[in-house]
Image (cartoon, rainbow, N blue to C red):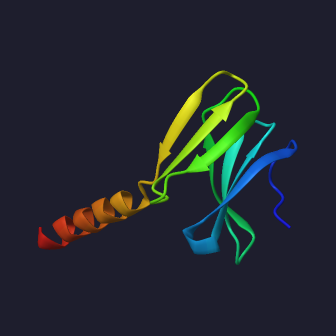
């Protein structure tokens, strides 16, 4: 069971070959879940009303959400980019 939304879940999409799940809710939040651990990995907060629509691009690098607030948001997966930046910073510190 995945419990973290405070209102009813409206839409779900499987990601990462079924290893993750994205969910939207009446609470205006988008949550990414690790299926194996049932833990919420991250919460995306960019809507002020119910999030009715959820889709992923074929590469799964972007999520598109649409809400009752009349907004369409495009969310980009920057986890690889952030990890690369952290490694670059660590290497830079080691070289100094």
At which x and y percent is residue 26? Answer: 81, 37
Which residue is most to the front? 58
Q: Quadrant of residue 67?
A: top right
Quadrant that contains the N terminus: bottom right
Q: Quadrant of residue 92?
A: bottom left
- Residue 86 lies left or right of residue 5; in this view the side is left
At which x and y percent is residue 20? Answer: 63, 67
Image vertical order of residue 86 relative to residue 56, above or below:
below
- Which sits in the foreground, 96 or 11? 11
- For the point 54% across and 34% down, the residue is 73
- For the point 84% across and 58% down, the residue is 3
- Residue 88 lies left or right of residue 78; in this view the side is left
At which x and y percent is residue 39? Answer: 72, 67
- For the point 72% across and 36% down, the residue is 51
- Which sits in the foreground, 86 or 30? 30
- For the point 28% across and 68% down, the residue is 87
- Residue 30 lies left or right of residue 17; in this view the side is right
């Amino acid at each position: 069971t995945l419990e973290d939304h405070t209102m009813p879940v409206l839409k779900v999409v499987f990601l990462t070959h079924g290893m993750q799940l994205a969910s939207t809710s009446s609470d205006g939040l988008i949550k990414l879940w690790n299926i194996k651990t049932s833990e919420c990995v991250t919460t995306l907060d960019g809507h002020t009303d119910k999030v009715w629509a959820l889709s992923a691009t074929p590469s799964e690098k972007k999520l598109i959400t649409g809400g009752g607030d009349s907004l369409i948001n495009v969310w980009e997966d920057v986890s690889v980019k952030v990890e690369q930046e952290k490694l670059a910073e660590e290497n830079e510190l080691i070289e100094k």
